[in-house]
Amino acid sequence: MRDNWTLVKHDAVKVTDKYYDEALHIDVKNMLALDADRLLAGFRETAAIIAGMTPEAKREFMKNKERYGGGWENSLIGGHTMGHYITALAQAAGNPGLSDEEQKAVCERLDYVLEALTVCQELTEGTELEGYIFGSDFPNKDFSDNLLLQFDNVEKGLGEIFTQSWVPWYTMHKIFTGLNAAYIIAGKESALKLANGLGLWTARRTEGWSEETNKIVLGIEYGGMNDCLYELYLINKKLKDEGSELAVDDPQRIFNAAHRFDEVELFEKILSGEKDVLDNTHANTTIPKFIGALARYEADPSETKYLEYAESFFDMVVGKHTYVTGGNSENEHFGKDNILDAERTHVNNETCNTYNMLKFSRRLFAATGNKKYLDYSERTLINAIMASQNHETGFTTYFQPMATGYHKVFNTLDGNFWCCTGTGYENFTKLQRGIYYREEGKLLVALYLASELKTDDYRLVQVCDLTDSEKVKITITPNSGKKITDDIYLRIPEWAKEFPEVRVNGDVLNEDNSVSGGFIVVSKELIENGGEIELALPMGLHYENLPDGKNTYAFLYGPYLLSARLGTAKMKTKFHGVQVSVPAERAVENDDIKITDDISVDDFMKDIDSHLIKRSGEMEFDLKGTDRDLVFTTHFNQYKECYGIYWTFKN
């Protein structure tokens, strides 16, 4: 029988870790600095055309604002940022880490955006486009004359991104997901009304597809349309069962529309385990499809095959295509199985992929209870997501190079509305997500991160900073008149050098009677009146190589990936792809390291504690016994200079 863990409510957890808290506030500051009217300009223009406004009335309706530039929002993919923006605002609105002033500003901005979109959708009532909201630009008159031309072109298999269609269903997925989040997290009924109107428009569109048309549509990136529609279905099904007037008349239509985006042929191919099946596939096109497969299982638990699809894909990506950060891909694509060293370049680890894999892993854990998903989540949050932000500006990365010697490149406030800019806004307004899970009679501490949890029965405070100490203290205080009725589950980290020592109210917990499925279990009887749980998590150095690079190694200390500091001398950028900024030069010619001691590479690694020396009281490590004088530090806060994660060792 599978476990049935659920993430605790978004507003029940406050992160108190200083670095994470700063990341939240600077992200919110950047979000509020954006001009909402410019993000809304495309939606207003589309609605004005549907309503038949004159050019003068249209400009006034758009508040005389234009879409943001930069080649994304002022193109056929315009509007995707708004979807991410709504999600991020909703997450911020429900985040107890914000001050009252910040909370007020975020809620006002979210309300303003939803009210504006509601006006846009109301202008479609009684027309053939009823319910439709969209924000793309119009490259020529054909697109303003036929507002659905992008969708028509997709159904014909036409996907030239500047003149035909730039993944409109992908953009629609972002909009749906934002509206769903605004309802689920922030409780905005107006967002659900918007989503339902758009959902019914989508249902009508998909109901007209032949099997052949459906197959053609699935050939052009559609994001996680299955995921967001199954989520919308579940919202409406619950409301329908409760007799709420907010529900659509027939939620099954939305469920059926979601299934139109289930690419079963691909799912079966992955399940077969065929060699190199992902070679040359676009990673961020593919990952959301399998999150959508998991969403079908979540919507209908009898569909266990869809859970198998999701689990198989996750294992394939993590086992054969993932770097030490938890990230994947080269130039947005998967390569052949286990070919990673050969694909280390300046354009690895697209941040959108990492965002999606983190989301995927947490939901897979909730569905299965398998600890491996939490181990992946921790690694990826710390070493890819936290590593994607410039901690001074709050701006975020598109790529994170795995080739040694490059640096991270970040977006700007109003000129780079890349896909990863949108996921970047989301990432840092939900840092409390994934720390705690609930099941009936159980609370799981999944991440060791300073935070506070409030439940109906008790308050839990976790104090720790693993960059400073191996100690974790968890204090549980029952609410007035309550007792602790949950067993407390503590994840045993994959990186722990030894079994963690646990004390409950000062007494050592017996290891033999307290381990279940990779978790230490503190029985509720030991803490029914509250108390303290203290953990000592034995940290130390460990290393990983690459399947096609036997002597190419990366180093970690506990959960923290280490990278070498390589200076600021060669931090130039250039454009790559569709106006994406990437590093242009390497700080080193190669990543070869010669071992000066008379030992093999294997023996060097086995005795790594003698060669990579931690400085007392610091997360700085000096490499000894080689021809390179390198200092390694925690990678998550390496944003000021060039770096080296992987190094190739030679005798």
Image (spheres, rainbow, N blue to C red):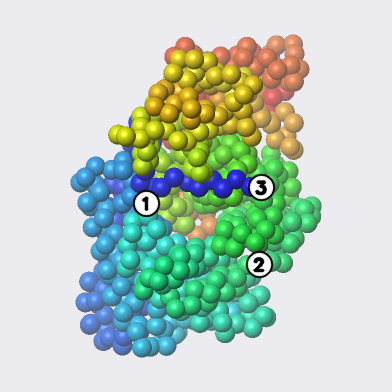
- Under tag 2, what secondary structure? loop
Q: Measure the alpha-carbon separation of dots 2 and 3.
A: 28 Å
Say what amino acid the circle numbered 1 marks. Answer: Gln
Q: Is residue 589 at least partly visible in the picture? A: no
Quadrant containing the C terminus is top right
Q: Residue at x 59, y 79 (%)?
A: 155
Earlier residue among tags 1 and 2: 1
Which image quarter: residue 304? Answer: bottom right
Question: Where residue 140 sits in the image (x, y, percent)?
Answer: 43, 80
Looking at the picture, which amino acid does disc 2 mark? Glu
For marks 2 and 3, the one nearer the N-term is 3
**Secondary element at tag 1:** helix
Above or below, 649 against 7 in this view is above
The type of residue carrying mark 3 is Met
According to the image, label 1 marks what residue?
A: 91
The residue wearing badge 2 is 263
Image: 475 above or below 454: above
Q: Residue at x 26, y 58 (%)?
A: 109
Q: Give the quadrant of residue 539.
A: top right
